Structure formats: structure tokens, C-alpha cells
């Protein structure tokens, strides 16, 4: 029986073709398109599977490399398979259900946001799995990303080098709460997806216990917003609990844009 992890098999040509589709993507409303996912997964998927959700003891990668859990995954994959014989996609779906899902921000939805608000330079203080960076590259928008996970330095470097773009991309690998935002220069959009409080545990991320808002969210929002261009946009992808906290931090009018509802536990879809 197969013992190697059932990675998504994406060729370099498929990734590049997916990126070119993203460059041509014209939507300014968020939807369900998977365009751009292969382009980011080509570099970031091996890292996403190593992240634990707070409700699970194992990441998907850890579970697969444990013989007892691997057999559990196989049994579950067989149950959910429509044919009775499971394949790699069924194994990945089984792991999504058993060990939680760590999804990326869809590059297609990031493109839609950029097309809607037309920024010239974006700050992303929780850069994550590259979706917003890739979208900025696709539209030739300058991008500064910050992330505490130093293991993502190489995937970002390779992604920026591989896909053609006129965007200037700067990556900073340290905790956002200690970044000096005054030294980042001009940016007219803050666009990010902050860690969902205690939902996911990322490498390099401090364990805030009960002080997530006091030690991370509020200081970073205040620090980055202070240097946002006067006509700039602050756009945050966050659950309602964080939105309620956000309302207490500003006197400005806040507009809500609902994300399309998506099954968090399925990611193997055709574009």
C-alpha cells in the first residue's frame, strides 16, 4: 500500500498556465473560481499540510506518517469514495474531514478585490499561503507581505521568480506586531486575512493564549492603519467575532462584503 503522502501532482507548466489564466481573470466580485489555486499550491501546498488546527492533535502530514492514523485515513477514504476504491483525491478529502482544513485565500477572489478597489501598493501583514501576493503579481500591483513563518521564505522567493510580473514584491519574515510600519513606505491598501484567533496554529506564530486581541490584532491594526494613505482602503477577511472587535477600533464607517460560502473540507476541484 502507498506510504508516501498523496500530494497534489501539479506540473510547472500547469502552474504557469493557471497563473496566466489568473492574469486574464476579469471578475470584480468574489465567487467560487479555483483559478490561481494550482499556481500557489505548486509552491505552498507541502507547507499547508503541516499546519495543525487548534481542535486537532495532528496535522495532515503528521497523521499520514503515523501508521495507525494512516490506516484510519484509508478506511475513511474508502467510505467516502463513490466507486468503492479510493484514490489520492479521496485520501486528501478524508484528511480534510479528520484533521481539519487549512485553506488559502483564493487568488481569484484577491484579484476581484484588487480590481474593485484599484490599489497601487498593497500591505499584507498576514501573508500566509501566497494567494494575495500572487493576485497582486498577476495585476502588476506592488506588494509588501509580512509573515512570521520563516519556512515560507523559500516558497515565496521561488514563486516571485517563477511567474512573470512587473510588480515589486517585498517579503518580511517576522511577527507583524514588532514590525515598524513607518519604514515600509507608501501603501494605499491593507489587505490581509488575519489568523482566525485560535482556529489555526502556524509555524513561527506566537501562542497568544487569551491575549490574541491585546497582543496581536489590535496593535497590528493600529500600527499599520496609522501609515495607510489618507484615501486608502483597509480590507480584512475575518469572522464575525473579529469584526465586532474591529468596530470598536475605528470611528470610520465599515462596509461588510460577504465571502461566498464554501465547503471548507473540500479543495480538490476542477478549475
Image: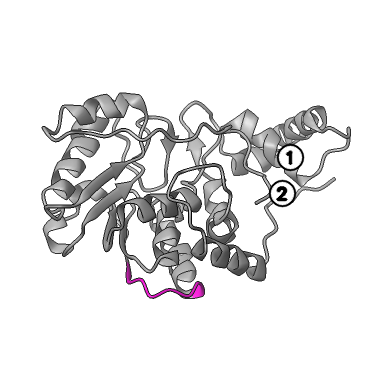
Measuring from the top left, give residue 61's x and y in whole percent: 61, 44
Q: How far apart are marks 1 and 2 (CA)?
A: 7 Å
Q: Mark 2 points at which residue?
A: 6
For residue 150, what is the image quadrant? bottom left
What numbered label is drawn on residue 102? none
Q: Name the residue under label 1.
A: 91
What's the residue at 26%, 50% (across, down)? 190
What's the residue at 44%, 35% (across, down)? 259
Q: Is there CB contact under 8 Å for labels 1 and 2?
A: yes
Count the numbered circles shown.
2
Q: Which of 166 and 78 is in front in this view?
A: 166
**Can see residue 125?**
no
* Label 1 environment density (alpha carbons within 10 Å; few <14, some 14–19, many ≥20): many
* Label 2 environment density (alpha carbons within 10 Å; few <14, some 14–19, many ≥20): some
Sequence order check: which comes first, mark 1 or mark 2? 2
Image quarter in which the N terminus is found: top right
Amino acid at each position: 500500500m502507498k506510504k508516501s503522502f498523496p500530494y497534489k501532482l501539479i506540473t510547472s507548466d500547469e502552474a504557469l498556465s493557471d497563473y496566466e489564466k489568473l492574469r486574464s481573470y476579469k471578475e470584480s466580485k468574489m465567487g467560487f473560481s479555483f483559478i490561481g489555486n494550482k499556481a500557489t499550491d505548486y509552491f505552498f501546498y507541502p507547507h499547508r499540510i503541516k499546519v495543525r488546527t487548534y481542535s486537532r492533535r495532528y496535522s495532515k502530514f503528521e497523521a499520514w506518517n503515523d501508521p495507525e492514523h494512516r490506516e484510519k485515513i484509508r478506511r475513511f477514504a474508502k467510505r467516502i469514495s463513490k466507486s468503492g476504491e479510493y484514490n489520492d483525491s479521496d485520501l486528501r478529502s478524508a484528511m480534510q474531514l479528520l484533521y481539519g482544513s487549512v485553506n488559502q485565500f483564493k487568488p481569484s477572489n484577491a484579484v476581484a478585490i484588487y480590481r474593485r478597489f484599484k490599489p497601487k501598493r498593497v500591505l499584507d501583514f498576514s501573508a500566509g499561503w501566497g494567494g494575495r501576493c500572487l493576485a497582486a503579481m498577476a495585476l502588476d500591483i506592488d506588494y509588501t507581505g509580512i509573515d512570521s513563518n520563516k519556512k515560507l521564505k523559500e516558497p515565496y522567493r521561488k514563486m516571485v521568480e517563477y511567474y512573470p510580473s512587473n510588480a515589486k514584491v517585498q517579503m518580511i519574515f517576522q511577527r507583524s506586531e514588532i514590525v515598524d510600519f513607518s519604514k515600509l513606505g507608501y501603501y494605499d491598501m491593507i489587505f490581509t486575512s488575519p489568523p482566525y484567533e485560535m482556529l489555526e496554529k502556524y509555524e513561527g506564530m506566537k501562542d497568544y493564549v487569551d491575549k490574541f486581541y491585546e497582543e496581536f490584532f489590535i496593535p497590528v491594526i493600529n500600527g499599520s492603519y496609522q501609515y495607510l494613505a489618507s484615501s486608502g482602503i483597509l480590507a480584512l477577511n475575518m469572522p464575525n467575532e473579529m469584526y465586532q472587535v474591529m468596530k470598536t477600533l475605528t470611528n470610520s464607517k465599515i462596509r461588510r462584503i460577504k465571502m461566498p460560502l464554501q465547503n471548507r473540507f473540500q479543495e480538490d476541484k476542477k478549475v
